Image (cartoon, rainbow, N blue to C red):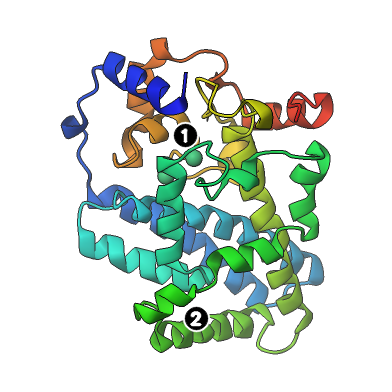
Amino acid sequence: MSYNLAKQKILYNSNIKIENYKKNNFYGLVNSFSLFFFFILFLYVISIDVNFLTNFLSIFFISITVYKMSFILHDCAHNSLFENQILNNFFANFTSTLLMINFLKYKIDHLKHHKFLGDEDLDVDFSEYIMTNNVIFHLVGPFFGSRILRFIKKNGVEKQMIKKNTFKIKSILMIILFQLIICIFISSFGKNLENIFFYYGFLATVTLGLSRLRAVAEHGQFIHKKKKHTVEHITVTHKKNFLENIFLYSFNFNFHFEHHLFPNIQSRHYPDINKKILNLHSDKTFKKSMFLTLFKLFFKNEVKT
Ligand SMILES: [Zn+2]
Ligand SMILES: [Zn+2]
């Protein structure tokens, strides 16, 4: 059974009425500001230059915060972070400028990921979660920089977009301004210039590495290259423990199975939806822990290509 057919079957059996799940602004504001708060807090700690270790650890935690900020962009891409569309657009623009991400391209690519999930040619994230060669290299490589080029390409500007005038000088100037401000604080006002190197280094490795791990855990398990389009479920929801909550998830992103079924519902509702469709889950679509899933993939090499 194809993924889309399986999805339709689940939707038909779920009895969930989307119109009952309303969006509000409070949820988006509280969760977004909590991430901005930590970003600024770590930036402040680095700027006062306590010692090398504190600076280094703070930069590491900033890279995790940045990874989590991508969830803001994700929910904005579905227009579901806020009830108010102006807030939605503002947070999308602000966060993408801070993260140096081309939001329009991100949004187009992500909606393709939803529409063509599991399609080697049309799902732009396919190569992110499928493991074609070596599982260990696929999972660990990004932490050593293997994803940098792909990331630049993915967030770059296509010629077509320049023609449509979506690529504005103003946004480039804003990106430069944001990065300049960050560099001033991160270098403790010019005292520790090496921190700038650590900051961008962590963004290019830890931040991208974490999103690779998540993508593989959520989508990479049931797709075997030779048998594509023949699996029922290729999306997994994970329960989260304390550590996973800190390092891997915000905005209920762990309910990825529910998200792919109802992508435009505000993510605050996913735990409730999860309870309602529990009988539709199997142990292949609802797992205990993402760390455990990755551990099994890594050490037992469960996915064969
Ligand atoms: Zn997905
Ligand atoms: Zn999505």
Say the numbered circle drawn on residue 175. 2
Taking the spot 74% from the left edge, 68% from the top edge, the residue there is 201
- Mark 2 nearby-residue class (10 Å; few <14, some 14–19, many ≥20): some
Judge whether 81 appears above or below 41 on screen.
above
The answer to whether residue 287 is above or below residue 93 is above
The image quarter in which residue 218 lies: top right
Name the residue at the left extreme: 19
Report ligand 2 position as a quadrant: top left
The mark that comes first in sequence, 2 or 1, is 2
Front residue of 70 and 187: 70
On-image quarter of the C terminus: top right
Query: What's the residue type where badge 1 is placed?
Result: His
The structure residue drawn at horizontal position 64% and vertical position 46%, both measured from the top left corner, is 127
Give coordinates of residue 181: x percent, y percent.
54, 84
Give the residue drawn at x 44%, y 38%.
252
Describe the element under mark 2 as helix, strand or loop: helix
Q: Report crowding for label 1: few under 14, some 14 to 19, many 20 or more residues within 10 A (C-alpha).
A: many
Does the numbered disc 2 mark a residue whose Cβ is under 8 Å from ligand 2?
A: no
Q: Residue at x 46, y 26 (%)?
A: 3
**Vertical side of 86 occupied by 275: above or below:** above
Residue 135 percent coordinates (x, y): 79, 37
SS category of the residue bearing label 1: helix
Q: From the viewer's perspective, is residue 38 above or below residue 168? A: above
Residue marked by disc 1: 256
Q: Is residue 3 left or right of residue 230?
A: left
Is 77 left or right of 100, judged from the image as shown? Answer: left
